[in-house]
Amino acid sequence: MFTVKHMLALSLLLISTAGAISPATAQEVNVYSGRQEALIKPLLDKFTEQSGIKVNLVTGSSDALLSRVKAEGQFTAADIILVADVGRLVRAKNMGLTQSLKSDSILNAIDNKWLDDDKHWVALTKRARPIMVKKGAFNDDPILSLASLTQPRFANSICIRSSSNIYNQSMVSALIDIWGEAKTLDWAKGLVKNFARSPKGGDRDQIKALVAGECSVAIANTYYLGGMLGSKDADTRKIAEQVNVIWYDQGENQMGVHVNISGGAITKFAKHPQNAEKLIAFMLTESSQKWYAEVNHEYPVIDGIELSKELSSMGMFKEQQVTLEKVGENNAKALVIMDKAGWK
């Protein structure tokens, strides 16, 4: 008899035929990645070359992939979820999609601050979200703090992505932990008041708008500027070369610059958990971290790794000391604050 239970199982197996993964074999690992294929596949190929373990890769929107794993449940093919932003990692854990990491090769590779308290996820890279201006701008009246962007002198001056962007949500989430909700709301209202235009586009678009004169201040992740500086396209490089990075709040008693991560987690129903741990451990090796730094212009999560020349050119900076779990947990509060501030 074909029951409702059978129908549910069949529907889960048929979810999203695009990017379907072949049946399980012993020497493979299945990865659902919210990161673009070009930003991860060369590293996965190197892992296969060294380990003999085949990596089956499905890419897509991080949020869509999390929903897919949730819908697939015990029938999911995914062994690993890779996403950019700690908010999504915390969300995956809270959705019951992940399990604890057990490998000493992972747990001993990095500082505990880059690891979930329950070991459900681990940071693989980090990126900062500084202020960016055109070279030569604000030399006589430098920007020293993020809070100062609410001042009248920045009226009609600021370019930034929309409130739906997870990077902005996490930045505001971190501020809630540092400043509290009331001060963060006041800041968000002041920032919105000084927008040069209604938020649109990605981080690269904010950088391009800055250089084009649509605004005099942009907020964007270093990863994007690094990629533009290292681009094969001469026009893209020319735009990026006109940009100066402002590391705000760098004083002894100041909070430092917001830092976010990309990271990975093993799914609750992983069919190849040992292979999954081997892949994550590989991503935390010196050679992999060096690849991330040189090719993707992301900051390593282990010490002693040389940065790309593009990242090095931006200088060193003091990071905010906010617990990553708090950044993820404050996401709902951040959305409320951004909505109240009129941040579209």
Image: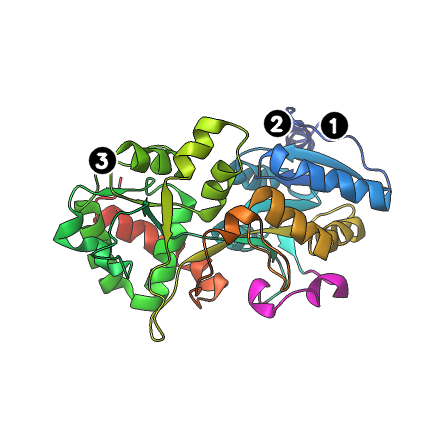
x, y percent for residue 104: 75, 66
Pick the front one: 291 or 321: 291
The residue beneath circle 1 is: 1
Q: Badge 1: few (under 14), some or many (20 or more) residues near its Cα, within 10 Å?
A: few
- Residue 5 placement, left or right of 152: right
Callout 2, which amino acid?
Ser
Disc marking residue 197: 3
Q: Earlier in the sequence, mark 3 or mark 1?
A: 1
Q: Residue at x 37, y 43 (%)?
A: 243
Image position of 291 with respect to 56: above or below:
below
Q: Earlier in the sequence, mark 2 or mark 3?
A: 2
Q: Which residues are magenta?
A: 101-117
Callout 3, which amino acid?
Arg
Q: CA distance from mark 1 to mark 2?
A: 26 Å
Camera sees residue 279: yes
Q: Residue furthest left?
A: 152
Q: CA distance from mark 2 to mark 3?
A: 37 Å
Q: Nearer the viewer, mark 2 or mark 3?
A: 3
Label 3's element? loop
Disc marking residue 16: 2
Q: Badge 2: few (under 14), some or many (20 or more) residues near its Cα, within 10 Å?
A: few
**Cβ–Cβ under 8 Å for marks 1 and 2:** no
| Badge count | 3
x, y percent for residue 6: 69, 32
- Residue 97 placement, left or right of 272: left
Q: Nearer the viewer, mark 1 or mark 2?
A: 2
Q: Which quadrant: the C terminus?
A: top left
Q: Earlier in the sequence, mark 1 or mark 2?
A: 1
